[in-house]
Amino acid sequence: MKSQSPLDIVHEKGLNGDYEGKNESDILKINEVKNLLIVQIVKFKDSKITISNFKINGIEMSEESNMVKSINETRILWVGPNNWLVTSTDKNLLPKIKETFKETDFAVTDLSHSRAIIEIEGKNCREVLKKGCPYNFNDLKKNNCVNSIFHGITLTIDMMNDSPEKIRLFALRSFGESMHHSITDASLEFGYKNI
Amino acid sequence: MLYIECPYCGLRSQNEFAYGGDGTVKRPTLNKEVSDKEWDNFVYNRKSPRGKHVELWHHISGCRQWIKVQRDTVTHEIFKTVSADKEI
């Protein structure tokens, strides 16, 4: 038996939309991110622990809203008060997290297989998201993250880079196909390449 | 379209929120005799004021926190927002 990624059926590689006559560097690149470790960490309401004492691979947990702290491929997203999302390509991170964040003060949940993840790269990333999301994307800078809604789908948006723009979108796995359809539909006018 | 200042995330569109009803309703004290009328008032009876009203909203597509919002029901102007554990 083989494991299947959430967008395996819908994500077909190739050029789409209005790409003709445009440089490949000007069109959007859409990629499904697979095999990413996603861990949710929630600090209990009655816990007296100070979060600034905790680090994951040397990365502090941000207490500032909508901020991401990162080193290399490990990113810690603030997704709510006392609520963080850790994303990493390092699968061995989970045991370390469970060891650091004791179950007396934190709820640690592995969400790796419950999210569909799309990465968009290119100068029109913000324009694509503006089509279906009420958030003011002009305010979104590098290492900002935001929970919002895109055509009725609840998304976590991680601004990985702003020059060139690179954005990672997380939706519930069951909403993955709808999200992919909405994002690619909004990308048609700019031309996009599924990679 | 309303824009609501979430005390945790900042200014966000109403699309991200779910309305949670009257924010002034208090649950009757536990382990105390409660009359049918008091219980009715807690469960069913609501005021429908014209003007300033304190409401509960849930930032369901954002930080998932409950907040209190003071809003004018006529003009929809929002005067103040605080976390649910605070009083307006």
Image (spheres, rainbow, N blue to C red):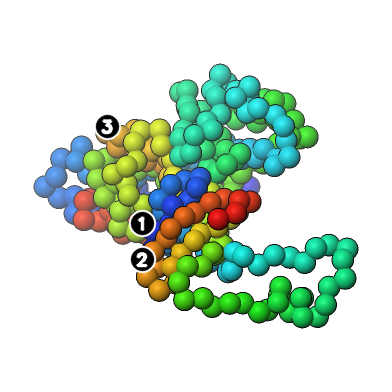
Do the residues indicated by labels 3 and 2 lie within the same chain of the protein?
Answer: no
Do the residues indicated by labels 1 and 2 lie within the same chain of the protein?
Answer: no
Whether residue A25 is visible here, answered yes or no, is yes
Residue denoted by label 3:
A163
Tell me where residue A26 appears, x and y as whole percent. Answer: 19, 41
Q: Do the residues labelled 1 and 2 touch (CB within 8 Å)?
A: yes
The amino acid marked with disc number 3 is Ser
| Gap between marks 3 and 2 measured at Cα | 32 Å
Which quadrant would residue A42 be assigned to in this image?
A: top right
Residue drawn 59% across the image and 68% down it: B22
Residue nearer the viewer, A41 or A49: A49
Tell me where residue A14 appears, x and y as whole percent. Answer: 30, 48
Parent chain of label 3: A
Indicate whether B70 appears above or below A145: below
Q: How crowded is mark 3: few (under 14 residues within 10 Å), some or many (20 or more)?
A: few
Residue denoted by label 2:
B1
Q: Which mark is residue A157?
A: none
Which quadrant would residue B75 be assigned to in this image?
A: bottom left
Say which element carries label 2.
loop
Whether residue B65 is visible here, answered yes or no, is no
Marks 3, 1: nearer the viewer:
1
Residue denoted by label 1:
A134
Do the residues indicated by labels 3 and 1 lie within the same chain of the protein?
Answer: yes
Residue drawn 24% across the image and 45% down it: A124
